[in-house]
Amino acid sequence: MDNKKILNSLSKAVSSIEVDVWEDIKNNSQSGLEEINSSSVQIPKRKSVLTKRRLIAAAIVFIVMVTGINSFINIVGRTAGMSSSSFLSFVEYDNKLFFENFKDRGRLYSMNIDGSNLMSLSDESVYNFVIDDNKIYYTDDINNIVITDLEGAVKKILENTNVLSISFVLDDWIYASNEEGIYRITIDGMIREKLSDVVPHTLINYGERIYFSNTEALYKADLDGNNATKIFSSNISKFYIYENDVFFFNINDGYRLYKINLDSLISQKAYFKSKSLSTSTNAFGISDNKLYFINERPASEPYLFEIDLDEENLTKLTAIEATELKVFGGNIYLYHPSSGGTLYKYSLEENKVEKMLSSK
């Protein structure tokens, strides 16, 4: 899709705030959840309305899902104030939550998982980061890679690396991407290799291969980029690999849940009691044989759902809006960009949502 057309759609959604814009954006994302009798936690109902914040957030999510996060950054410009983005980078590690602080120009922060001991770890804004072996790797606002300790005290800058997004660190290589493709860079910054011309939505490591997706397909390749193969043809924004199966919501099929076995490469829709599942936000994560996702439709309450990957049980957990979701052990962290941004934590053990950070 042409970037100017995308920006035009966003402008209409933000300035006009009309229901038909929502429907244009969401016309391929209708959910089958209303046909399912799921077990649910009793939660007081809020009045469901189409507010400005939901329309704006939906427009942003739409752009990211269609164009990819790298293209989105190129369209809107990489600035210190990214709190309006549907994407937020956060990681639970060593009993702390590390996150991009939307309240402080996107700088890197940490806090205890109970919300105490808030600490600033960077002077510059960060776009995204990963943690590996007690070190934090992130890109600064001029696209250099910065390596620091968990306190942000000792920093090493790899200059002229020119990457927007870091995906993972493996065997002394940093795997990253920009608007020209996928790269790997040694942790000393001395070697920089281009692995693919594909500008990825998602790039992950599984076994001895890398897997990545863009607006056209899902691919696999060797760790050095050789033997690249197309696995599945579709616009795939976000995916996870769990126990040798790839899970993703297929944009080209109404955002319905699909899975692909990496041995057979057979793809199929994932069903629950003969009903296919779909999401409108692409916010989902996998942990301990369960898939968690946000389902949000224009005229209904957004909810967090849990589904067993053996497809036997679907549970409605709590009413919540989110455009980004990550699962770490017994906690699910959720982010929504409305009103400057809000970060939540949902405890699976306590069945409770608490607000970790908010701009309100």
Image: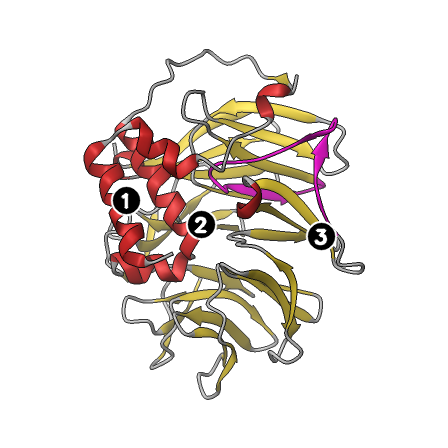
Q: Which residues are magenta?
A: 267-289
Q: Which element carries disc 2, helix, strand or loop?
A: helix
- Which label belongs to residue 65? 2
Q: Give how far apart the Cα atoms at labels 1 and 3 are.
A: 33 Å
Type of the residue with mark 1: Leu
Placement of the N terminus among the 4 image quadrants? bottom left
| x and y percentages locating residue 94 in the rendered image | 54, 52
Q: Which residue is mark 3?
A: 260
Given residues 233 and 170, the one toward you in this image is 233
| Amino acid type of the residue tagged 3 in the rendering | Ile
Reading the image, the residue beneath label 1 is 10
Q: Residue at x 56, y 78 (%)?
A: 172
**Residue at the extreme left:** 15
Of residues 157 and 336, the one drawn nearer to the viewer in this rendering: 336
Would residue 146 be found to the left or right of residue 41 on screen? left
User: Where is residue 342 shown, x and y percent of the image?
Assistant: 35, 36
Residue type, label 2: Met
Residue 34 vertical position relative to residue 6 in the rendered view, above or below:
above
